[in-house]
């Protein structure tokens, strides 16, 4: 069987590899960071879900953008993403700092590196939970989002023309069949 031209859906090893490259950490460092951050995230979820408003905010974070049972737009915007999830889990800046200090002390990793990794790790954790409820194209979109989020924004950011080039090429190919070009 040949390799598909696209990554397999939700490949945790590939996502962690991309996150490792993004943050310049070794496999052991990523493993230590995740093993320190995950229990803190789960404690944050338990705390947030203990109140009706907190549970509603967490469920909204797991809802795809633009969809909700009440007809109101749900989900987090792409701009807020991981920082908003960290804010849901640790609503107080002092708590976030304490979590970072504790994880840094227990793992031996730098606090700054962990602070940069925290939103990505929180998004990956929440995405893996949301994935349990997504089916079909929604799951594929979620997988693509998580893979892109792990990679981070390209440097330098692409221009609008570069972003539209694949679409323009597809449209040109489509209409060329009608015009005989």
Image: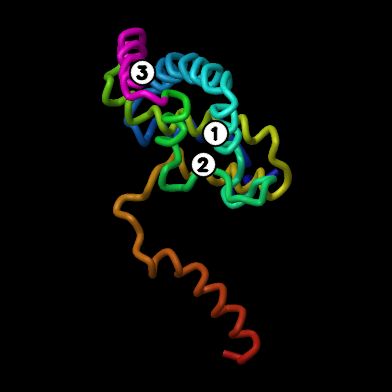
Per the rendering, the mark at residue 95 is 3
Query: Mainly helix, strand or loop, the magenta region?
Result: helix
Q: In this rendering, is residue 26 above or below 43?
A: below
7 magenta-colored: no
Instruction: Assign a secondary structure to mark 1.
Output: helix
Q: Residue at x 52, y 22 (%)?
A: 48
Mark 1 crowdedness (10 Å alpha carbons): few <14, some 14-19, many ≥20: many
Q: Against 161, is 76 above or below? A: above
Front residue of this view, candidates 150 and 105: 105
Image height check: is 94 above or below 70?
above
Residue 31 at x, y percent in the picture:
44, 18
Residue at the extreme top of the image, as rendered: 106
Name the side, left or right, on which 88 lies relative to 113.
right
Q: Residue at x 26, y 25 (%)?
A: 112
| Gap between marks 1 and 2 measured at Cα | 24 Å
Pointer 3 or 2: first along the chain = 3
Magenta region, residue range: 91-108
Q: Residue at x 48, y 47 (%)?
A: 77
Q: Is residue 180 visible?
A: yes
Residue occupying image coordinates x 42% and y 23%: 90
Q: Secondary structure at mark 3?
A: helix
Which residue is disc 2 drawn over? 147
Dot placed on the residue nearer the N-terminal end, 1 or 3: 1
Label 1 belongs to which residue?
A: 57
Where on the picture, by quarter, is residue 56?
top right
Say the numbered circle drawn on residue 25.
none
């Amino acid at each position: 069987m040949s390799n598909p031209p696209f990554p397999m859906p939700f490949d945790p090893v590939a996502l962690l590899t991309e996150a490792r490259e993004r943050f310049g950490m070794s496999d052991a460092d990523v493993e230590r960071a995740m093993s320190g951050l995950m229990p803190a995230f789960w404690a944050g979820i338990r705390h947030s879900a203990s109140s009706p408003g907190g549970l509603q905010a967490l469920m909204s974070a797991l809802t795809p953008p633009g969809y909700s049972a009440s007809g109101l737009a749900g989900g987090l915007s792409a701009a807020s993403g991981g920082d908003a999830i960290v804010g849901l889990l640790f609503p107080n800046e002092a708590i976030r700092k304490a979590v970072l200090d504790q994880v840094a002390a227990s793992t031996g990793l730098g606090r700054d590196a962990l602070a940069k990794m925290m939103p990505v790790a929180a998004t990956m954790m929440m995405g893996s939970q949301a994935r349990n409820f997504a089916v079909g194209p929604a799951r594929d979109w979620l997988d693509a989002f998580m893979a892109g989020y792990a990679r981070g924004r390209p440097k330098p950011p692409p221009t609008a023309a570069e972003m539209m080039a694949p679409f323009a090429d597809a449209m040109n190919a489509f209409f060329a069949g009608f015009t005989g070009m």
